[in-house]
Image (cartoon, rainbow, N blue to C red):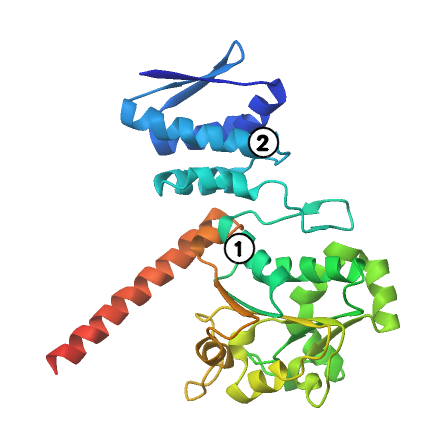
Amino acid sequence: MEQRISIERLEQAVNIFGSFDENIRLLEQEFSVSVTNRDGELRVNGEPESTAPACKAIQALLTLSSRGETIGEQNVRYVIDLVRAGRESQIAQLTGDVLCISAKGRPIKPKTIGQKEYIQSVLKNTITIGVGPAGTGKTYLAVAAAVQAFRDKQVNRIILTRPAVEAGERLGFLPGDLQSKVDPYLRPLYDALFDMLGAETYQKYLERGNIEVAPLAYMRGRTLDDSFIILDEAQNTSREQMKMFLTRLGFGSKIVITGDATQIDLPADKVSGLKEAMRVLKGVEGIAIRQLTGADVVRHVIVQRIIKAYEDDEARRAAKRDKREVNR
């Protein structure tokens, strides 16, 4: 069976096909169809049950392309997953929402439905807790929102913080003073800020005190007014640290807390402050809790597969534990 899709501009076809036709090859492989570009039309050939979803995926990619999105492997895989879940109509929600422009002029915007809902929560609420696996853009998008709020003069300062929990390393063995010792823990936050602002602008704001990047311990005893505050790697906070941090909130400020509950580096007998905050603060007005999933991963596809493999393994182990409990 053959279905045809009209293409308005040649650039759209080039964008959809990708470098060396890699996008269209992926689509052909996933849906067991063949796609050719002829006389201003995309022709999709295959079994009826394959051509219909393939055409839906192509239409969704055309929607993204028409709004200026450069189509890559991540877009194609995400669209395929949406089509298989019957949610391809939601792809139109992803277009047009530029959160921030990076130092190099690149628009930064949500790439998945989950990321868009997360950012909407950040913009709407005083406190947002974003939880999800590595690669879902939790920290990067939060920093982009902070930079935009600062540029729009909604806040006077950006404060980025992380707990300096030792994930198998020892701080004492690192060379230098205390700042040098904690800098490696804060590197992902520096990297995101450099990308948004450029190294020179970042340094200028740092010297003026408009930007602060510091370990969580430095927050104790302060009240943070007119600030956009991001707590990263929050799964490694203790119950006491999380309460201390949340109560730093001052007037005109916004807090974003990000973390991955599957990567806790605390001792086994310590409760994660992130997990407890999600439980205690659920339903509190002005506080949003957003769960991102493997579907929102925008890194290499292998990262998605790794996350899924670990989730499957954890599910198997939980089932075995439950079975042992029942047999006791």
Can residue 148 be seen by looking at this rendering? yes
In the drawing, does residue 235 fall left or right of residue 45? right
Determine the secondary structure under disc 2.
Answer: helix
- The residue under the point 53% across, 67% down is 288
Question: How far across and down, in percent of the image, does residue 312 sit?
Answer: 31, 60
Can residue 139 be seen by looking at this rendering? no
- The residue under the point 55% across, 43% down is 94
In the drawing, does residue 292 fall left or right of residue 147? left
- The residue under the point 44% across, 55% down is 294
Quadrant into which the N terminus falls? top left
Residue 65's tag is: 2
Residue 117's tag is: 1
Question: How far across and down, in percent of the image, does residue 121 sit?
Answer: 57, 61
Q: Nearer the viewer, residue 247 or 18?
A: 247
Residue 66's tag is: none
Cα gap from disc 2 to disc 1, whole angstroms: 21 Å
Neighbor class of circle 2 (other Cα within 10 Å; few <14, some 14-19, many 20+) is some
Q: Is residue 295 above or below residue 170?
A: above
Determine the secondary structure under disc 1.
Answer: helix
Question: How far across and down, in percent of the image, does residue 151 sit?
Answer: 80, 58
Residue type, numbered disc 2: Ser
Neighbor class of circle 1 (other Cα within 10 Å; few <14, some 14-19, many 20+) is some
Q: Is residue 304 above or below residue 84?
A: below
Check whether the beta carbons of the residues at disc 2 and disc 1 lie within 8 A of each other: no
